[in-house]
Amino acid sequence: MQEYITVSMLNAYISRLFDQDEFLQEFWLKGELSGFRFYKQSGHSYFSLKDKDATINCVMFKSRMHTVNFQPEDGMEVLLRGYVSVYARQGKYQVYVEEMIPYGTGSLFLYLEKLKARLAEQGYFDAARKREIPRIVNRIGVVTSQDGAALQDILRVIRQRHPGAQVIVAHSSVQGSEAPRELAAGVRMLNEHGLAEVIIMARGGGSLEDLMAFNSEQVVQAVYTSKIPVISAVGHEVDVTFCDLVADLRAATPTQAAQFAVPDYTAVQKHRDELTLRMNRCMQRLLANRLERLDRCLMRKVWTQPQGVAKKQADRLTSCQQRLGAAMLEKVKNDRHRFALTAQGLDNMSPLKVLARGYAIATVEGAVVRRIDEVSEGDLLNIEMIDGRLTAVIEGKEKIERWKG
């Protein structure tokens, strides 16, 4: 019995062939829209793309339709980025569209303005996120065409300014349908392998269509997510692409980009030599100053006549000891005199002196009696005299008015 395969097996086999073809997995396709249908319920769009000789079916799913910044219409020329695959159920192949932009100068300008506004709103062009280019760079990554004049200009300047620098070239198309993918892949490759300290993206001048790869969302996203600072040098000075806006630094030309990327080692070495000369002169002046101070120190008597200096200090010490001894004696004499005067004053104020003159001290229950009102008849009165103590009982009181003067 003859072997056979099913329709599903055949379609699955064809689908695998499409999926394994690298060319069919991402490309740019130009053509005219035909039969464009947008289904609001699902959000998907179905249409054909044609030229004068052929037609191909296309589908753009809802997840990608939000990137379209214009109203697609039948008869409009567009550029599509997408891939080809087989719809196994019906056994037909079609283009699955990832990105759609108008083709033609007027439509292209409109598309670019809308895309620029959207990217700016998402923060891709914010100046605050841009990084400084390192001052000293020894490894430079260049994403450009290896056959272009831009690369030769960059290499020439780097060799002149920094002969020891290492240049890693990530070859890429700089225009055409494959350029956006290859440019983005070059930036990602340099980041993944850490092969560079700064990246230059460059190409020479050209028309708006020629520079479109550097306006693609793919390239903008790759530059935005790069961990390595990026210098953009696309076209001439008047050309400004989205790659220029998202890069950390924009150069007017590839030559200027190389100048920004590496220091002029001739100037660096000259500056180093000048600093070395200045440092040597400063050290010489400092050393001369220290030697002069040392000479002055060695000329002092402490070094030339140490015995005389020692005797002079010993004489000063003896004189200080004598003055200190005399001062101590004078202070003791003064303190003794002050003590005698104080003792005499205290002795004069002693109660015993008062008692010796015939006075007595009367107390009642230990309290000194000063006025007649402080005692009553019948109180026991103690009388302290110079040579003893008397005890008496109060039998009467008589108040005497004395002149107080």
Image: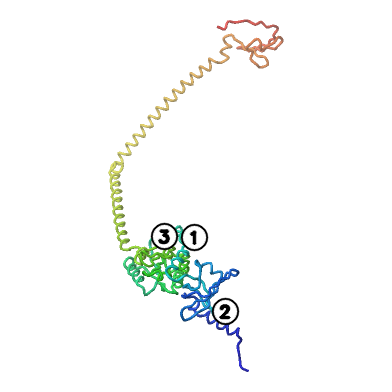
Does 271 sit above or below residue 307? below
Question: Please, which residue is most extreme toward the right here?
Answer: 378
- For marks 3 and 1, give the CA distance: 23 Å
Residue 103, percent from left and from top: 45, 71
Foreground: disc 3 or disc 1: 1
The amino acid beneath tag 2 is: Tyr
Mark found first going from the N terminus, 3 or 2: 2
Mark found first going from the N terminus, 1 or 2: 2
Which residue appears at 49% of the width and 75% of the height? 26
Quarter that holds the C terminus:
top right
> Toward which corner of the image does residue 112 lie, by quadrant?
bottom left
Give the camera-side residue of 104 and 161.
Answer: 104
> Toward which corner of the image does residue 239 lie, by quadrant?
bottom left
Mark found first going from the N terminus, 3 or 1: 1
Residue 308, percent from left and from top: 30, 39
Foreground: disc 3 or disc 2: 2
Which residue appears at 66% of the width and 5% of the height? 398
Q: Where is mark 2, residue-wise?
A: 87
Question: Please, which residue is most extreme toward the front here?
Answer: 75
At numbered mark 3, what does the secondary structure look like: helix, strand or loop?
Answer: loop
Give the camera-side residue of 181 and 389.
Answer: 181
The amino acid beneath tag 1 is: Glu
Q: Where is mark 1, residue-wise?
A: 121
- For marks 1 and 2, give the CA distance: 37 Å
Describe residue 94's horizontal placement relative to residue 306 as left or right: right
The amino acid beneath tag 3 is: Glu
Q: Where is mark 3, residue-wise?
A: 132
Q: Can residue 388 be seen at all in this image of the molecule?
A: no
Q: Can residue 349 be seen at all in this image of the molecule?
A: yes
